[in-house]
Amino acid sequence: MVGVGLLKFFRGHWVHLVFGCGVFGVMGLGATGNAEAKPDEGTATIVSLGDSYISGEGGRWRGNSSFTLYNHGGTDRAPTMTYAGLPGKDHSVPTAIYGNSNGQNGKGCHRSDVAPIKSSKIKEVETHNLACSGSETKHVITEGWNKTDYKDNDPQIKQLQTLAQTNNIKMIVLSIGGNDLGFTPIIMDCIRLWGNPLAEKTCEQMHSPSNDKLEIIMERVSTVITRIKTVMEQEEYTFKDDYRIVLQSYPSPIPSGNKFRMEDTYTARFGGGCPFRNVDATWAHNILVPRLSQELSGVAADQDTDFLDLHRSLAGHEVCAAGTTQPNSDSDIFATNAAQMEWFRFVTTGATQGVMPESLHPNYYGQKALGRCLNLMWKKIQTQQQEPAQQQEPNANNNINNPIPRLHGTCHSTLQQGPKHQTLAMTPTIPFPSMEVEEVD
């Protein structure tokens, strides 16, 4: 049973397991000048901010395959070679997927064409993906910046403020905190333990986050949300009335130890691109990811923002999960069967296909599924705004106080089904009035 002790343990750490400085002070960004549009003017727009789990890292791949020629068993959406060794006919370079955010050697923001905000297919709105792979909280706000911005991009909040001056921002979706925690070093150490048959420690023993560290990271995430509200207020937006903030958590890229489709052997796990011991996979899937999601939920509650819980949103489609498969020939036939594909990029060094930063990120299918989750959340928000406000009793000052309740949605995958079959379950976020039941003789 999860009790108060668990909430206390994680309260105050990072937000989104995305795998992918103290407490930042709240500082104003200065005068913004005359805005060109007001909240009720301009094109309705939704914006994504944060790290690689929302920027679209890994979107190049529709599944995984150890087949190294041409399009890698049909999984590569941007093949660079044909059988004859000539440039590919359809997409010659990864920029076909990541555009001008590809960067040198894949070290760009990796905003893919199927990033969740693009795959959401929300009607009658513009979508702007300002997220950047590798971002920490300090890369969203303005503190900690030198003259050279992160990957040649302005702080994301500065980009948001500029956009808010011309467009009508309706929703801001945020995924942040995983890189503050140091998720990549944690994963790399888990892999090293797998490769060392003499290792006695577990990944949990090496990297279970301390209370203090988690508290600092969660405070950073909270500060990011505060700063977002500040710049939106500077542009004459009213929180909740004019726009919503949706904080999302992270999906688990690997299954628990008893849910792998192959045995816990070196050859099997190495070939499948999932080099993890059962004990470490179980810790990451069953403990680390859910706890992080729970704590992000706490930040959302403190900030009165909506929360999209994604920690089980791609369940059954993790790397090497039972019931999934990897194409073993150069054919598009298998890779187009989304229901049977893995929805995360497997672990790769980038030596023969793709780049290492794509490892353990939602791939083409995973991002389509996350986009569906976002679409369902948007619909819930729209439905709520169209419903009459709940009636409340006057308070002590005889004033009616009826704030818009925040939403908490948990997205789930459907086993043996594709991304279109995601579901969203809503959790009550406001207390319901107690009901007295009369006894009947």
Image (spheres, rainbow, N blue to C red):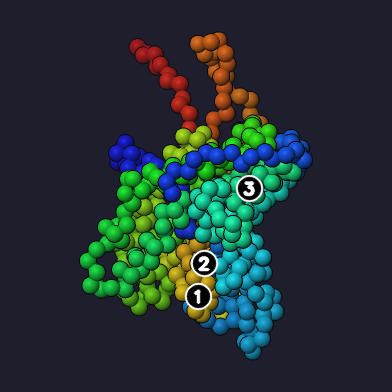
Q: Which residue is mark 1?
A: 350
From this viewpoint, is residue 96 visible?
yes
Residue 370 percent location from the top left of the image? 55, 53
From this viewpoint, is residue 372 visible?
no
* Residue type, numbered disc 2: Glu
> Relative to the observer, which residue lies in front, 109 or 198?
109
The tag on residue 110 is: none
Which quadrant of the figure has residue 84? bottom right
Q: Is residue 198 above or below residue 360?
A: below
Label 1 – label 2 distance at C-alpha: 9 Å
* Residue type, numbered disc 3: Lys
Quick check: 241 left or right of 209? right
Mark 1: few/some/many CA within 10 Å (<14, 14-19, 20+): some
Locate the C terminus by quadrant. top left
Q: Which residue is mark 2?
A: 358
Residue at the image point whose x is 33% and y is 51% from the top: 209
Q: Are circles 1 and 2 on residues that touch, CB within 8 Å?
A: yes
Query: Dot 3: what SS?
Result: helix
Of mark 1 and mark 3, the one earlier in the sequence is 3
Residue at the image point whose x is 56% and y is 25% from the top: 403
Query: Dot 2: what SS?
Result: helix
